[in-house]
Amino acid sequence: MRSRALLALYLAWVVALTTIYYVEPAWGVTIWALIGVTGAVAVGTGVRRNRPRHARPWLMIAGSMLSYAVADTVAEVMNPAAGGNQGHTPLVVDITYLVTGVLLITGLIGLVRAANMGRDRTSLLDALTLTAAVGLVSWIYLISPRIVTADVTFVGVVTAVAYPLGDVLILALAVRLAAAARRTPATMLILAGAAALFAGDMLYLLTKLAGNWQLGGWVDVFWIAVYAAFGAASLHPAMVEITEPRMVRPGELLPTRRLVLLMVSSLVAPGILLAESVNGPVHSGTVISLASAALFLLVFTRLLDAIRAHRQAVARERGLREAGAALVAATDVAQVTAVVREAVAHLLPPGTDHRMMLAVRRRDDPHSLGVLPPTPELRYTPTLPRAQAEQLAGFEVTLRCSLPLADRPSGAPDIGVLLIAASKRVLVTLPGAVEVLASQAALALERIELNDEINRRDSEAYFRTLVQNTADVILIVDDDDLVRYASPSATGVFGHPMVPGTALLDLVDPTARAAAGELLDQVRSGEHDSPGADWTVLGPRGRRLEVEVSSRDLRHDRTVRGLVITLRDVTERRQLERELTHLAFHDALTGLANRALFTDRVGQAVERTRTSGQVAGVLVIDLDDFKVVNDTLGHPAGDELLVAVAARLTGVLRPMDTAGRLGGDEFAALIEDASHPAAIERVAERVSAALSDPFPLGDHLINGVASIGVATTRDANDADELLRQADLALYVAKGAGKGHWRRYQPALHTVIVERLQMRAELDRAVATRAFSLRYQPVVGLADGETVGFEALVRWEHPTRGTLLPGEFIGVAEETGLIVPIGNQVLAEALAAAAEWHSRAPDGLAPYVSVNVSARQFRTPGFIEEVRRQLSTSGLPPDRLLLEITESLLLREDEQIWVDLAQLRQLGVRVAIDDFGTGYSSLSYLRQVPLDVVKIDRSFIDTVASSTQQRALVKGIVALANTLGLEVIAEGIQTPSERNILVGAGCPYGQGHLFSKPLEHRAALRWLASDRVAAA
C-alpha cells in the first residue's frame, strides 16, 4: 500500500474511533485504549516502512504512546470514579504517566540530536530555562492550590509537578526540532502533537481545579490529536528526512529573540515575588528562591557557552587569516593541500579524529568530479564517489564543500572539492569557516593553474630554440622509416647533416638493425612507448656510438604526424657504467671477484648442486706472514705480493672456478661441479703447494705460506653456512700452524669451543699466576760446563695437567695475554737466577735466558719493566739473556733499534732465536745489535745425515764468529750431533742429550753436581 493511502486510512480510522468515543460513552474506556494502541502501532509501522537511519527515537515515542494509553485504561478500570472531581489516581498509574513523559522526552531529544547531527546544548539550556520559568508559574497558580486543597500523596505531588514541566520541555523540544530539522510535514505534525499535549494537560489542570472535569469531555480531543499527530508523522515518508544529515548554518551567538526569552524567563521569579508581596504575605518564598537560583545558573551557563563559542569563532578567524596568507605563498597543489590540512586541524577542536581530502578537477576532464553543491553539505561517507569514500572510510559523515570560483569565464564554476570527515557534532559547527577556507583554496589553485598555463605558453615560445640547440638528436620518422626531420645536433653525432628521406635503419650498426626495426614496429603497434632501449649507431668515420633511444608515436598529432625518436649519445656513460659495475663486483687491486660477487656466486653454486647432485666447495685462504711483509718491506711490496698470490691462485683453478679476494690478505676460491669432496681437498693441496713456493719481489724472496679452510656442500645447506664452515676450518688450520689446510668436519665445532674455553681459562690463569718455569741447561759442547739456563714456561692447568707452550702460546698471542704472561715469566726467572748468583762463587753463576715475544717487546714500557725487575731481583744485567724472534728484527721500526740499544747499554744481552727460519736472515746480522745466535733445531736434526746441512751450519757458525757473536745450537739429541757441532766450531748447545727442562730445585741440584764435577 502506498504511503499516502496508508496515512489517509490511519487518519480516517482515528476520526471513526473519535466519533464512536463521543457517541457511545459506555464504550469510552475501550475506544480510548484502542486510540492509544493504534497511535503506537502507527509509529511502529512507519518506522518499519520508512526505515529511518535513527529508529530508536521513534520507538521511544511509540513506547510513550502505548504507556499513555495503558495508564489511562488502568486508571479507568481500577478507579472508575477517578474521572470525577472526587477520584484518586492509583500509584501505579502515576508512575506509568511519569514513564510516558520520560519516554516521549527521550525520543524527542534523540530526534533533535539526529537533526542537529550531535548534541544541541544551547537549545537544551534555553528549553530548560523556559521550562523552569513556566514551571514556577504552574506551581504558584496551578499546582500549589491543588495540593493545598486536596489530600495528595507524594507521588501525586511529583506527578502534579512533572506534568506541566514535562509538557513545557516537550513543547520546547518540538519547537527546536522544527527549527533544526528539514521543514517537512513530519516535523510539523510532531510540533502539532506536542502543542496539543501541552494544551490538553493545561486545560485538564484548569478544569480539575475548577471542579468541572469529566471523562469524555471536550478536552479529550487534544489528547486524541496527540495520538493522531505522532502516528501520522511516523507514517509520512518525510519522517526519514528528520534524521538525515543537514547542515544548519549557525546564526548569532545569542539571537535577539532568545535573549528576550532568557530575560523574560529570568524575570518570572522576581515578578511573582513582587506580585505576592503587593497582594499580601509571600506564601511560596522557598520555591521562588529555588527557582530564581535555577534560572540564574541556567542563564549564566548559557552566557558562558556564548563566550566560549565567541572565543572559538575568534580562533577560527585567526586560523583562516593565517591560512589565507600561507595560500598566497603556495606554488603547487601539494603545498595548497598541506596548508588546507593544517588549517582544518586548527578549525577542529584539539585532538579531534578526522581526515581531510582535497580533490581538484583534472584539466583534461572538467567533469571528473561531477556537479558539486554550491554550499557546504553533509553526506554519509558511503554515498560519496568510490575513490573519495575509500579514502575517508571509517567516518560516518563527511562535510563536502566545493572550491568556488566566481565569474569564471569557462569550465565548471568550481575548481575542486574539499572533504572533511569527522564526528557529526563537530562537522555541524564548521560550514561557515570551511566555506571561507574553500574559497581561499580555490583562489590559490586557480592562481597556480594560471601560472602553469602562462609557463606552458612561454615554453612553447622557446621550444624551437631548445630543439635547435639541444645535444640530443630529435628525429621525426614516417611510416617507411624515413627521416622527415632531424635536429641540427644530428650532424655532431653522425658526422654529416641529416638529409630528409634518409633511411633511419641505415644509420644503425648492422648488428643492431633487426632489434631497431622491431622497436619501431612495436612503437607503431602501441606495445612500446617509453625510453630505455639502446642502439649502436655509426658515427663519424665509422666509429660505433651507443645511443639511448626514446620513442613516441605521434602520428595522430596533426603537428607531427610521425614517430618522434630521440637519440642521446651515452657511449662514455655506458663505458663508465661497465667500469663501475666491474669495480663494484671485483677487487680493484687483484681483479678477482670481491666479497659481494663471490658470495653471490657461492649462493648460485649451492642452488645448482640441489638439482645436479654434484658437490661445490669453498676454500678460504689466509696468508700467514703477510703482516710481516707489510711491516718489513712496506705496503707497496705487500700489494705486489697480493697480486702475485692472485695470479698463482687463478693459475691453479679451472676456468669454471671462481677466485676472489675477501679483504686484506684473505682470498677465497669456489670449486664447482666436483664429483666428491675429495676432489675439492685435492684443489686445496694444490693451492697450498703453489703458495708455499717463495715469491720473488724485487731483491727479496718472500714466503707465501697460507692457511686454508675448506668446506663443501655435503655439510652445508646454504651459502651462508658454507662460508661460515670454511671460516671455522680456516680457524682450525691456523691453530695447527703455518701452511696447513683443514676441511670442515662437525668435530671442528668442538675444537673451536675448546679454543674459546682455553681463552677464558688462560685469562683466569694469568690472574691466579698458574704458570711455572722449567730450566734447560745451556752447556759448553767441548767441556760440558753449564753456562746458563733457558727459562721455559709451563701452564699448570687444573684439569689437563702441565701444558707445554705450544698448547697455549698461540692463544695467548691472539688475546694479548702474552704480555702479562711474559712479565710473570721474566720476574720468576730473574728471581731464580738471583738465587743461583747468590749461591755460586764469583764469576761462576750461570745466566738465565728468557724468551720475549714480538708483541711483548713492542709493548710501550717494556724496557722500563726489564730495568725495574732487574733492580727488584738484584741480578746483574749481564746474567740476563733475552731471546727475540727473527720476525721482530725484520720490522723496520726505528723504535725497535732504539730499544735494543738501550737493553745492551743496561748490560742485558740479546739473542736471536730460531735463526735461519725467517726472511733474509744473513742480511741483518751485521746491522742489529746482537750478542748470541741460536741455531734452530730444524738445522740440527739433519746435520748428521746431510752434508749440505752440515755445510750450512758451518757457514752460520763461521759468519757468527766473524761478526763476534756467540752461537748456541738448539735441540741436540745425539752424541754424533754434538761432535759435528764441535767440529764446526759451535761453542755452546742445549738439548735432551744434556738434560731435559728442570724444575727450579732440580736446576739447583744440577748446578751443585756440575760444580762438584768441575772440581
Image (spheres, rainbow, N blue to C red):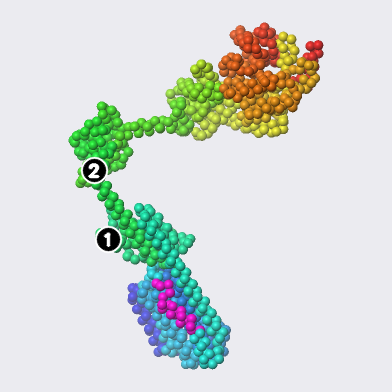
- Quarter of the picture containing the C terminus is top right
The answer to which of 145 and 839 lies nearer the viewer is: 839
How would you classify the magenta stretch by its main secondary structure? helix
Task: Give the x, y percent position of residue 562.
Answer: 22, 42
Whether residue 166 sits left or right of residue 358 in the image: it is: right
- Secondary structure beneath dot 2 equals helix
The answer to which of 988 and 444 lies nearer the viewer is: 444
- Residue 243 found in image quarter: bottom left
Mark 1 or 2 closer to N-term? 1
The answer to whether 20 is drawn above or below residue 918 in the figure is: below
- Residue found 46% across the figure and 60% down from its top: 353
Task: Give the x, y percent position of residue 820.
Answer: 67, 30
The answer to whether 739 is drawn above or below residue 507 in the figure is: above
- Quarter of the picture containing the N terminus is bottom left
- Residue found 55% across the figure and 91% down from its top: 281
Q: Are marks 1 and 2 in contact (CB under 8 Å)?
A: no
Can you see residue 340?
yes
Residue that badge 2 annotates: 464
Residue that badge 1 annotates: 408
Identify which amino acid the numbered label 2 is placed on: Arg
Identify which amino acid the numbered label 1 is placed on: Arg
Label 2 environment density (alpha carbons within 10 Å; few <14, some 14–19, many ≥20)? few
Mark 1 vs mark 2: give the one in front. Answer: 2
**Residue 252 on the magenta span:** yes
The residue range painted magenta reads: 251-269
**Residue 227 on the magenta span:** no
The answer to whether 942 is drawn above or below residue 19 in the figure is: above
Whether residue 799 sits left or right of residue 608 in the image: it is: right
- Residue 787 found in image quarter: top right
Can you see residue 91?
no
